[in-house]
Image (spheres, rainbow, N blue to C red):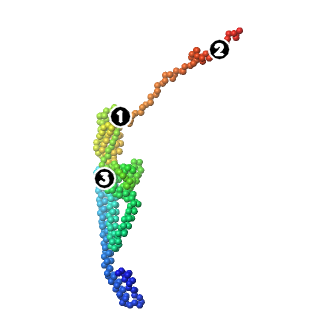
């Protein structure tokens, strides 16, 4: 019997009530408290224990994740500035990736621990959790349908970061935009385009990613020459120019292999195309191609080898002068028997007029 019902069943002592009735009421209340105090104490201790364990566990896990992230960042900073760090590690990329992973893990850990603790506390109060869980499930489904694009972007960003598909400093082709990655987020990736523009690409909209900065790149140069040039001499000149380039800074670090003359790509009546290629450091193919074109052009000019960019323009020849242009047209007065000549002759007067 609950305390309110007990107090209602036993009338309160009035001015005319006896001391026995008051004592009986006080005894009943004391007995009710004595019967239920252990339950109260047990429930309170359970709630305090659940909250304490949840808070301690959450603090320990968050600190462990923070130390792990700091250790990853220190490892990246230790090799920054060295040759190995320049080739294998991008400190800003590692920092952003580790911070994003740490943020996701800390949020997931806090949600799981605190959510479980709240459900256990409600269970300690003997509250039926079935309707609450059913309502939460329906609300979660409704929110999922309403914010499905946001959820898609978030999940795509998490997997992109965990799989290290790209990072800060990489040059990528995301289909909808291309450029250098300047920031990687859980929902949006920022790219710097070739003309300086910034592209905000939603992670859920990316269907394919072409990373141009992982592994190695290829510098390809095409040299268009006159078809009458000696190919062996052309190969020797290009090899000398490439060997000279590979010995100088910074090209000796950016070139990861020898510059090779692959052969002829096209052979036409008025030109032939020689293909030159080299394996380079990731993201340095464009600069290597420009320098290689510069040096090959200079070497070929010095060697007297003709470079063409297609068929030379045809010069229009002036037409020969017409020999009949200086001759006058025939005149009708050149003939003495023509009607025009006869008409222009003076009329001779008849002889009988003079008599």
Q: Nearer the viewer, residue 270 or 286?
A: 270
Q: Label 3 neighbourhood size at 10 Å, few (<14), some (14-19), many (20+)? A: some
Which quadrant does the N terminus fall into?
Answer: bottom left
Where on the picture, by quarter, is residue 46?
A: bottom left
| Front: mark 1 or 3 | 1
Label 1 close to label 3 by CB (< 8 Å) = no
- Residue appearing at x 49%, y 22% in the figure: 323
Label 3 close to label 2 by CB (< 8 Å) = no
In this view, which residue lies farthest toward the top?
A: 355
- Picture coordinates of residue 156 (x, y %)? 35, 56
Measured in 3D between alpha carbons, the distance from the residue under mark 3 to the one under mark 2, in whole angstroms, is 118 Å
| Tag shown at residue 89 | 3
Q: Nearer the viewer, residue 75 or 332?
A: 332
With 86 as the anchor, is 16 left or right in this view? right
Which quadrant does the C terminus fall into?
Answer: top right
With 28 as the anchor, is 345 left or right in this view? right
Q: Is residue 44 above or below residue 188?
A: below
Q: Secondary structure at mark 1?
A: loop
| Front: mark 3 or 2 | 2
- Residue appearing at x 57%, y 16% in the figure: 335
- Residue appearing at x 33%, y 83% in the figure: 31
Measured in 3D between alpha carbons, the distance from the residue under mark 2 to the one under mark 1, in whole angstroms, is 80 Å
- Picture coordinates of residue 142 (x, y %)? 39, 62
Q: Nearer the viewer, residue 269 or 17?
A: 17
Measured in 3D between alpha carbons, the distance from the residue under mark 1 to the one under mark 3, in whole angstroms, is 47 Å
With 31 as the anchor, is 325 left or right in this view? right
| Tag shown at residue 347 | 2
Q: Is residue 351 above or below residue 52?
A: above
């Amino acid at each position: 019997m609950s305390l309110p019902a007990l107090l209602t069943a036993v009338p309160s002592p009035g001015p005319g009530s006896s001391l026995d009735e008051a004592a009986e009421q006080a005894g009943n209340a004391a007995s009710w408290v004595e019967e239920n105090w252990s339950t109260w104490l047990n429930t309170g201790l359970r709630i305090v224990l659940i909250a304490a364990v949840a808070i301690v566990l959450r603090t320990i896990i968050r600190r462990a994740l923070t130390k792990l992230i700091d250790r990853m960042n220190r490892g990246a900073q230790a090799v920054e500035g060295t040759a190995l760090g320049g080739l294998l590690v991008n400190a800003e990329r590692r920092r952003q990736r580790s911070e994003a992973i740490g943020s996701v893990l800390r949020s997931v850990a806090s949600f799981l621990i605190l959510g479980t603790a709240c459900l256990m506390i409600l269970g300690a109060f003997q509250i039926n959790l079935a309707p609450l869980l059913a309502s939460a499930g329906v609300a979660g489904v409704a929110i999922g349908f309403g914010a499905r694009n946001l959820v898609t972007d978030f999940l795509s960003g998490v997997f992109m970061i965990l799989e290290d598909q790209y990072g800060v400093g990489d040059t990528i082709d995301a289909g909808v935009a291309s450029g250098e990655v300047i920031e990687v987020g859980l929902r949006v990736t920022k790219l710097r385009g070739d003309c300086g523009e910034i592209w905000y690409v939603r992670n859920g909209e990316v269907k394919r990613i072409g990373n141009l900065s992982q592994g190695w790149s290829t510098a390809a140069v095409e040299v268009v020459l006159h078809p009458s040039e000696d190919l062996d001499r052309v190969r020797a000149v290009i090899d000398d120019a490439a060997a000279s380039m590979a010995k100088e800074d910074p090209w000796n670090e950016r070139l990861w292999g020898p510059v090779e003359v692959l052969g002829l790509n096209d052979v036409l009546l008025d030109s032939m195309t020689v293909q030159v290629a080299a394996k380079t450091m990731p993201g340095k193919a464009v600069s290597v191609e420009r320098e290689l074109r510069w040096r090959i052009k200079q070497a070929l000019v010095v060697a007297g080898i003709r470079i063409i960019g297609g068929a030379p323009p045809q010069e229009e020849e002036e037409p020969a002068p017409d020999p009949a242009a200086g001759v006058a047209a025939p005149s009708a007065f050149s003939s003495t028997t023509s009607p025009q000549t006869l008409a222009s002759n003076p009329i001779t007067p008849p002889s009988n007029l003079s008599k």
